[in-house]
Amino acid sequence: MARAATAQPKFTRADADVRRRSLMAATARCLARDGFDGASVRRICDEAGVSAGLLRHYFDGKDDLVAQTYEGLAADFTRITHDVLQGAAGGAEERLRAFFEISFTAEFIDADVFLVWVAFWRQVRVDERIRRSHRQAYAAHRRDLENILGEVAEQNRFIANPRLAALSLTALMDGLWLEISLDATAFTSVEAAEICGNWLDSFTGRGFTGRFE
């Protein structure tokens, strides 16, 4: 009687997703440490503990890997902020203030996270795919802000331009995020969220309500 063949493990889509995410996470770490030019295929593979052949199995080279890493991080950011801004819990202002608080937590202002985004921003200028992904991600984020600021205006019964308000708020938050990422001693995350809250008070016509001492 012939011996039954030993069953061989089959790779599933979940296995492939784990490998892809592992390579993308390694890419982000290399970008933070080495910058775009220093994040070579070899260094990324060493960081992930895989061969260059496996990388090429899942990605069409370094540029594709970097682009997909950016797209993944941008999608995660958009999903997190969308869930907070458009969630069912609380009124529009409550959700917006919750968004302010989340935006300045360690998850978003970690030094390595900052360096990864700096590397990506450089590529936005020279890589059409990343530039297109950047525009789409930020457009989706601004639409969420426009929607919730429109809700705030409607609930407070005043006329506003949600698009311009969203652009203004985005510029403020990006500036605060940049400053606190460069120098965490300049102000605290609580103060950053409070500054954004003061912007919201001005937007609604309540004026400055700061509690700085």
Image (tube, grey):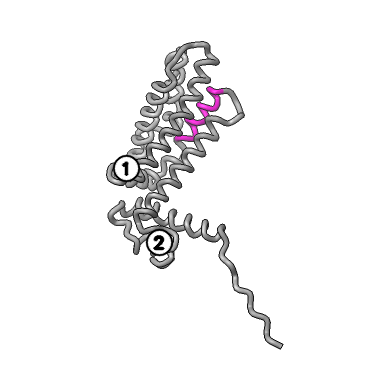
Which comes sooner in the sequence, label 1 or label 2? 2
Note whether residue 213 is visible: no
Q: Which residue is mark 2?
A: 47
Query: Local crowd at mark 1 within 10 Å, few (<14), some, or many (≥20)?
Result: some
At label 1, the amino acid type is: Val
Locate residue 144 relative to residue 133 in the image: left or right: right
| Near-viewer residue (167 or 179) | 167
Where is residue 170, by image quadrant?
top left
- Write the residue at 52% across / 11% down: 157
Q: Is residue 56 visible?
A: yes
Quarter placement of the N terminus: bottom right
Looking at the picture, how far across and down is residue 12, in whole percent? 57, 61
**Position above or below: 62 against 173:** below
The stretch of residues the image draws in magenta is: 92-103
Q: Amino acid at mark 2?
A: Glu
- Against 59, residue 71 (above or below) is above
Marks 1,2: beta carbons within 8 A: no
User: Circle 1 sits on which residue?
Assistant: 124
User: Which of the image's four quarters has the C terminus?
Assistant: top left
Position of residue 50 measured from the top left corner of the image (x, y, whole percent): 43, 66
Residue 168: image quadrant is top left
